[in-house]
Image: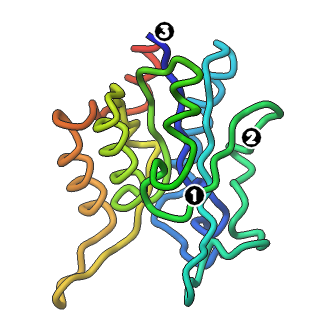
């Protein structure tokens, strides 16, 4: 089985001072960096996914801004694949599926931002593309949400979306368990 690390949208705008700061991005990026170090050390495939806004009225991940760059904690190394996307699902209108297939990848470890948006939609799509998926829960971050006048804290948004993924679309576990599993 060939497993790739899929780092989704760990970009500057999600960090303090960015245009869409999340809750806990530094802690999540620290865990993602631990996964990245393992994949590099074991020479397993790494794919970075970077969102660049292309819709009118977008307020973050704007083209040619520092906010749209991948955060220094998980900066791509020479030779690592970087996919640019314009939708939450990293498979939609990108070459991600073809790139993973060309590497012989049949499983992915997912880490990134935002849990409720791009991590969720990309993990579901990966599963639907026949990939075995593991989501490193503590290597993901999100933000508070609201609906119909009800505020939902980031920790509950995070837990709800991971709970929905776990078992059906992915195995969801902490980074330490992912690293143990990978050896």
- Which mark is first along the chain, 2 or 3? 2
CA gap between label 1 and label 2 equals 16 Å
Kindly state the secondary structure of the residue where label 2 is placed.
Answer: loop
According to the picture, the residue beneath numbered tag 2 turns out to be 76
Q: Residue 183 carries which label?
A: 3
Q: Nearer the viewer, residue 146 or 44?
A: 44
* Residue under the image location 52 percent in, 37 percent down: 6
Relative to 157, is 74 on the left or the right?
A: right
Where does residue 157 sit, x and y in percent of width and height?
A: 27, 63
Q: In which quarter of the image is residue 77?
A: top right
Picture layout, residue 145 above or below residue 140: below
Where does residue 58 sit, x and y in percent of width and height?
A: 56, 83
Where does residue 42 sit, x and y in percent of width and height?
A: 64, 12
Q: Which mark is residue 40?
A: none
Kindly state the secondary structure of the residue where label 1 is placed.
Answer: strand
* Residue under the image location 20 percent in, 56 percent down: 160
Q: Residue 85 carries which label?
A: 1
Relative to 97, is 150 on the left or the right?
A: left
Q: Nearer the viewer, residue 78 or 153?
A: 78
In this rendering, the label closer to the viewer, 3 or 2? 2
In this rendering, the label closer to the viewer, 1 or 3? 1
Q: Quadrant of residue 117?
A: bottom left
* Residue under the image location 33 percent in, 60 percent down: 116
């Amino acid at each position: 089985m060939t497993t790739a690390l899929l780092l989704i949208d760990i970009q500057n705008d999600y960090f303090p001072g960015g245009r869409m700061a999340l809750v806990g991005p530094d802690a999540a990026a620290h865990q993602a960096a631990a996964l990245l170090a393992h994949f590099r050390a074991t020479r397993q495939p790494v794919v970075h996914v970077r969102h660049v806004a292309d819709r009118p009225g977008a307020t973050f991940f704007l083209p040619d801004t520092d906010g749209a760059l991948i955060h220094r904690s998980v900066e791509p190394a020479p030779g690592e694949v970087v996919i640019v996307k314009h939708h939450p699902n990293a498979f939609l209108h990108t070459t991600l599926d073809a790139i993973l297939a060309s590497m012989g990848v049949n499983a992915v470890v997912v880490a990134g931002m935002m849990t409720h948006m791009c991590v969720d939609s990309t993990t579901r799509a990966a599963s639907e593309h026949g990939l075995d998926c593991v989501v490193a829960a503590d290597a993901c971050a999100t933000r508070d949400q609201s609906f119909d006048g009800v505020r939902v804290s980031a920790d509950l948004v995070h837990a709800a979306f991971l709970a929905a993924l776990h078992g059906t679309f992915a195995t969801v576990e902490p980074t330490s368990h992912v690293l143990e599993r990978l050896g």
